[in-house]
Amino acid sequence: MTHLTNDHVEWAVVGRLRLMLDEPPHEKFNVTATYALFTTILCWIVQHIRIPTHEIKSPDDRIAHQLLEIFSEGAIADEPWRINVTPTARIERVG
């Protein structure tokens, strides 16, 4: 039998969500389920890397905080992400 320590509870939840992404997709709601799992994981990670300096309590918190500093140094349009951020034309509605 395994035991999750307090330091690992949050990571265990995200790890289990990740494992759910590896399972065969649900037949009827496969896209919705995948999107829900992905966004939950993403939101958790973004929340954790935004940990304020005065709340850092563990080596994992420090690593998460350092990750935010690394991400803050570059633009999302630059390597390695290269996400297109150019404005798009507005959609014209006729009728």
Image (tube, rainbow, N blue to C red):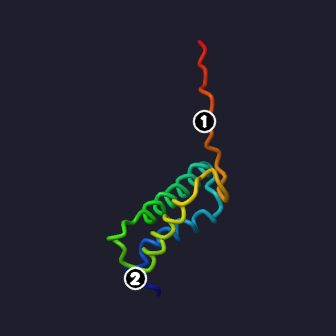
**Residue designated by label 1:** 87
The residue that appears at 47% across and 73% down in the rendered structure is 11
Nearest the camera: 3 or 78?
78
CB-based contact (under 8 Å), mark 2 and mark 1: no
Mark number, residue 14: none
Numbered circle sitting on residue 5: 2
Q: Where residue 59 sits: x, y (%)?
A: 44, 80
Identified by mark 2, the residue type is Thr
The answer to whether residue 14 is above or below residue 8 is: above
The three-letter code of the residue at mark 1 reads Pro
Where is residue 50 shown, x and y percent of the image?
A: 42, 62
Q: Judge depth for marks 2 and 1 and give the one in front.
A: 1
Distance from disc 2 to disc 1, alpha carbons, whole Å, reads 46 Å
Nearest the eye: 61 or 95: 61
Number of marks in the rendered image: 2
> SS at mark 1?
loop
What residue is rendered at 59% in x and 12% in y? 95
- At horizontal 53% and vertical 71% (from top left) the residue drawn is 15
Mark 2 vs 1, N-terminal side: 2
Label 2 sits on a secondary structure element that is loop
Identified at 59% across, 55% down, the residue is: 34
**Relative to the observer, which residue lies in front, 56 or 93?**
56
Q: Position of residue 48 (x, y in %)?
A: 43, 65
59 lies above or below 73: below
